[in-house]
Amino acid sequence: MKDAAPQTIFLADYTPFPWLIDAVSLEFHLSPDKTRVISKIVFRPNPASKGGEFFLHGEHVTLIWAKIDGATITPTVTDKGLTCAVPDGAFTWEAEVEIAPATNTALEGLYMSSGMYCTQCEAEGFRRITYYPDRPDVMAVFTVRVESALPVLLSNGDLVAQGDGFAQWHDPWPKPAYLFALVAGDLIATSDNFTTMEGRNVALNIWVRPGDEGKCAFGLEALKSAMAWDEQVYGCAYDLDIFNIVAVDDFNAGAMENKGLNIFNSALILASPATSTDRDFERIEAVIAHEYFHNWTGNRITCRDWFQLCLKEGLTVFRDQQFTGDMRGHAVKRIEDAILLRARQFREDNGPLAHPVRPESFVEINNFYTVTVYEKGAELIGMLKRLVGDDAYARALDLYFTRHDGDAATIEDWLAVFTEATGRDLTQFKRWYAQAGTPRVTVLDDFKDGTYTIHFEQKTNPTPGQDEKLPQVIPIAVGLLNPDGSEAVATRILEMTQDRQSFAFTGLDSRPIPSILRDFSAPVILERDTTMNERAFLLARDTDPFNRWDAGRELARAVLRGIVTAGTPAPRAYLDGLAAVLRDDSLDPAFRALVLSLPSEDDTAQALSEAGQTPDPLAIYHAHEALRVQIAQHLQDMLPRIYAQNQVGGPYSPDAVAAGKRALGNAVLAYLARLDGGMQAAQQYDSAANMTQQLAAFSCLLAIGKGVDQVQAFYDQWQDDRLVMDKWFALQIANAAPEVAVQTAKALTQHALFDWRNPNRFRSVFGALAGNAAGFHVASGAGYDLLADWLIRLDPANPQTAARMTAAFETWRRYGPDRQAGMRTALDRIRQTKGLSPDTGEMVARILG
Ligand code: TRP
Ligand code: ZN
């Protein structure tokens, strides 16, 4: 065996696998250090292929024996897989391999977590279980026999036989290997059932380790809601008699949609009022729905190759966003999604890691499970829906489900059903999948003789490997308001297709105030030179909730820039605008909470760098803090009343109304803390009846440099709960003052409960450090050094998580020479580490450019 150099894979090189698989049967003899896997695979030539070498992927597996049609053979084995001569027609492959789940710290393939066996095969983890054509376009029916003394033995599909020390599962739906799953452990189920619209009775189980069974009720309710919603809205029903979910403590991502056996990071399934915040509940509901929705968008229709990842992820994110909107309100959900997209995807699109929604090449596919593929991918679906209309969207989706059921499909297939269902030529739209970078749309306008004209210009900056950008189709939702706030022209979608384009509105009495990009109708940056007064007017009067919120956000961004660059305090128009929204009890509390929240410090840094300035994270931190104090002082008369009005009594419920009130109460609490030194927050901490209230009070105290007693009290109360302790680690670092953040993080890495091999715990420390902009970018470079040290330590154990976290450095080009040098030194040090994984190697190379 020799080490092959990391290889770049290209979309253009796709060829089908030369064989099809009629059936797969797997037999597992589980043991921590010596698990044996016996496979039997029936191959036959693929008529769609011109033929080729018989190559099976296999990594970190030891071949014991192999047979073709019953005769022992000796394949040529490398560290990537094996080849051998095979008969011309159909044949049966059999092999036995040995693997060691107990020492598998990468958490890909079969591994152990808190005493249980579990798997993670997406994207290319199945090859760590046995030799197989581990690619999504090879679909097969699996039969799985699991042998172990553990009491609960699970795999995909239906349970067909069970006895002392074994269980046998059969999944009738052909699937790619990345959807394979196996779980074995001492687990307890919380169960329910659901009858589909087709009359199928489905047993639902959430499996957890003993002690966690009290945290499953919410997940089961969310699952049933998602199942009902997918039937009502998309006509998609579940297709097996059993649906299992398992909670796992050590997991590289959020959750995984394995057919009939979803596996979840325990942080995204276990929920209880005492240990989970409102945000956790909302996120858990959304992730359960997301994984469930994959059953049709991902499993029944899968991806031809990993370049098509957005085909399943963009669409499934879009579907879970629709679901959450229906469950909890569309306006607030849209704002939350826009905040995430701008904070993370625009940042990615604007830096060295920018890539198209459908990338054209990769070294390690795990590095492309990104906000661009997921969230921008979802925006593309939303734009398509806006452009063709709701009815046509529904027809196109029906066609997609009927035509491609059972297929491994492509973006071309996806767009073709829209063209067919609507007659629309989507050639230009397809650029959204190929072109990286966020389009900037600049707006000018004029008014003459009753005609109001908007002039748009679009421009996308170069991104790595793409110097020239072509104009994209941009649906721009526009409404016009009269100066008295009434609507002059209701929302309409303007379709921009050229570099420069103008749209006229005739027959107007007076110059209207435009409300542009309503509902965030496209993932673009809107640039418009306008007055504070006009933004304040929109904040007070816009009838589109997204743009109303966004007007406030644009004001805040301008104010923050003014404070950082010139020390100009916030103008009255802005503060009065905030006061008017806060005071207006007719507005949804959740919406008011969002209006009160400020852009992140990273957002201000990004804005300054786009304006050609060098951001100073410390100055930005102080500007944000100064603005918080100024807002608190301006609103001080009404804060106690709003706080009191938004306390929620009675038993805890995570519903949107109650959560919205708590969100507003806690947004107000953060301002009160700037006035009363944390008195109210300390009181709330002591009387908190749920984690939402406790955690909000805790972070208010930490943010103003208090909370020493609460750090100890929280620890004493929650030290035995891993998920709550993740919050304890994260909060102390996220809220640490800039000069002590690195020290705080460093001290916490020495804590007995800092288990760095657990991805949740690692992220709770280093995700929080990277998110504390002024702390991470402290002038000494200590933040960069600490993160680099730990990424170097994590990489050999868990390359996937290490690689993903290198993105903390993606903004290095924004900063001044000293910080740039500090980050480059850290990145160089990672790059030069002996034995660095291809995962992290690819990321560092891309970041350095
Ligand atoms: N397909 C999963 C989802 O979107 C994502 C996922 C789970 C994943 N585990 C992973 C991606 C491991 C990469 C590696 O829901
Ligand atoms: Zn997904």
Image (cartoon, rainbow, N blue to C red):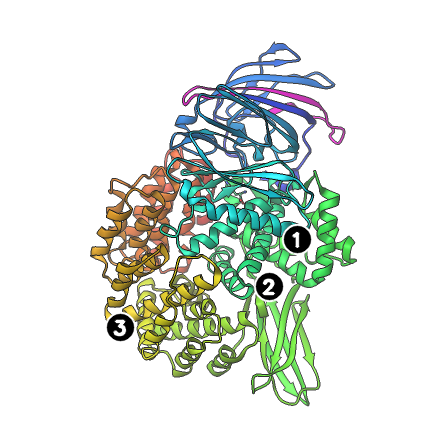
Name which of mark 1 and mark 2 comes first in the sequence. Answer: 1
Q: Could you tell me how far apart the alpha carbons at marks 1 and 2 are, in whole angstroms?
A: 27 Å
Residue beneath the point at 25% across and 63% down: 682
State which mark lies toward you, 2 or 3: 3
Secondary structure of the residue carrying tag 1 is helix
Looking at the rendered structure, which numbered label has been put on residue 675?
3
Residue at which label 1 appears? 232
Q: Is residue 46 magenta?
A: yes
Name which of mark 1 and mark 3 comes first in the sequence. Answer: 1
Query: Which residue is more in the foreground, 55 or 284?
Result: 284
Magenta range: 28-56
Q: Could you tell me how far apart the alpha carbons at marks 2 and 3 are, in whole angstroms?
A: 40 Å
Residue type highlighted by circle 3? Leu
Residue at which label 2 appears? 522
Location of residue 321 by image quarter: bottom right
On screen, residue 689 versus residue 64, left or right, reads left
Q: Is residue 829 visible?
A: no
Residue type highlighted by circle 1? Gln
Q: Is residue 191 magenta?
A: no
Residue type highlighted by circle 2? Ala
Query: Which residue is more in the foreground, 649 or 799?
Result: 649
Q: Could you tell me how far apart the alpha carbons at marks 1 and 3 are, in whole angstroms?
A: 49 Å
